[in-house]
Image: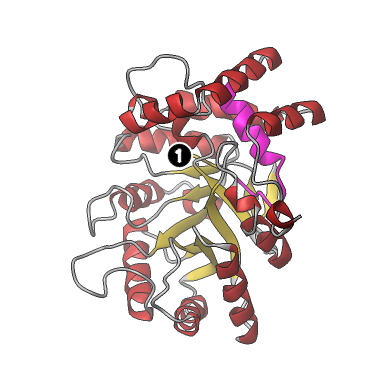
Amino acid sequence: MKYIHLGRSGVKVSRLCLGTMNFGPETGEADSFAIMDRALERGINFYDTANVYGWKVGEGVTEQIVGRWFAQGGGRRDKVVLATKVFGRMGEWPNQSRLSALHIRRACEDSLRRLKTEYIDLYQMHHVDRETPWEEVWQAMEQLVREGKILYAGSSNFAGWHLAQAQELAKNRHFMGLVSEQSLYNLNERMIELEVIPACQAYGIGLIPWSPLARGLLAGALKPVTTGRRADEDVKKDIEKFRPKLEAYEALCQTLGERPADVALAWLLHQPSVTSPIIGPRTMDQLNGTMRVLDLSLSRETLKRLDEIFPGPGGQAPEAYAW
């Protein structure tokens, strides 16, 4: 396994991040435990979850599964850089969602209880809260850091200007601010190259791409399936929408002798600021198969061809649209 600093922080994380969103809804607890154990065996030390995963309001189903896995001991918690998130609705009352200091405090305490741990390594804001001032958000995060309940703060689904605003206000408070941003990023969805990635580079923020396979579009979507995400009607519509690109992409992968999913992940690992793409295996076979990507190097010619098939926004703003 290869390791990399999480943004400008001193902590090192694996080049692949184990996403746990399927644990509970798609993958049973025993299989989830086995996948997490296997990930550790393969050197993956970066695990990502969220208080809303499991999709039962207020229950934190996935966090509970991860917590019971930690409770087995064996050094599991000490080996893992644990990331979870706050923002989503955890109840029906007015202050049981978003990023008020009140909700951040209560949500953190609840996550700690479910995860059966004394601290969270990376506490991520799951979405920007336009209704809460940054002074309030940072005050709450600073207090959690002082109490040793979180070590680092991160964001998810932020625009570039949100990252800049957050970092400038954190700097004024003599606080480290964000060390990571978790964004939708893959070959087919490259909008963040305009401003989010430049902001990450400027502020030393690590980029953690989610949905690296575009809900299965980049995992060999043209092969008929009857189960999994590629069988969803929305995904089927996307397959037809992007069929010419997918045909060219899968033909290129066949020429390379590589699986489409591996090429998609390898492409992300070649991109600036990317720390660790999030892989979300539902099965042990999916986890084992993904490890191949760490040894897959794409040539300059292959990267150029991928840009031709899946053109991005044209680079960073404003040059991408102004010149």
Q: Quadrant of the N terminus?
A: top right
Which is more toward the observer, 264 or 48?
264
Kind of residue indicated by mark 1:
Met
Judge by depth and name the residue closer to the eye, 94 or 293. Answer: 94
Pointer 1: what residue?
36
Residue shown at the point (65%, 37%) measured from the top left: 311
Q: Which residues are magenta?
A: 258-276
- Residue 180: x and y in percent read 59, 60
Disc 1: CA contacts within 10 A as few (<14), some (14-19) or many (>=20): many
How is the structure coloured here?
secondary structure
Identify which residue, 80 or 87, lies in the foreground.
87
| Residue 143 picture location, percent across and down | 47, 81
User: Is residue 313 toward the left or the right of residue 153 in the image?
Assistant: right
Q: Residue furthest front?
A: 323
Tell me which residue sits at (62%, 71%) in the image: 164
Query: Is residue 292 shown left or right of residue 40?
Result: right
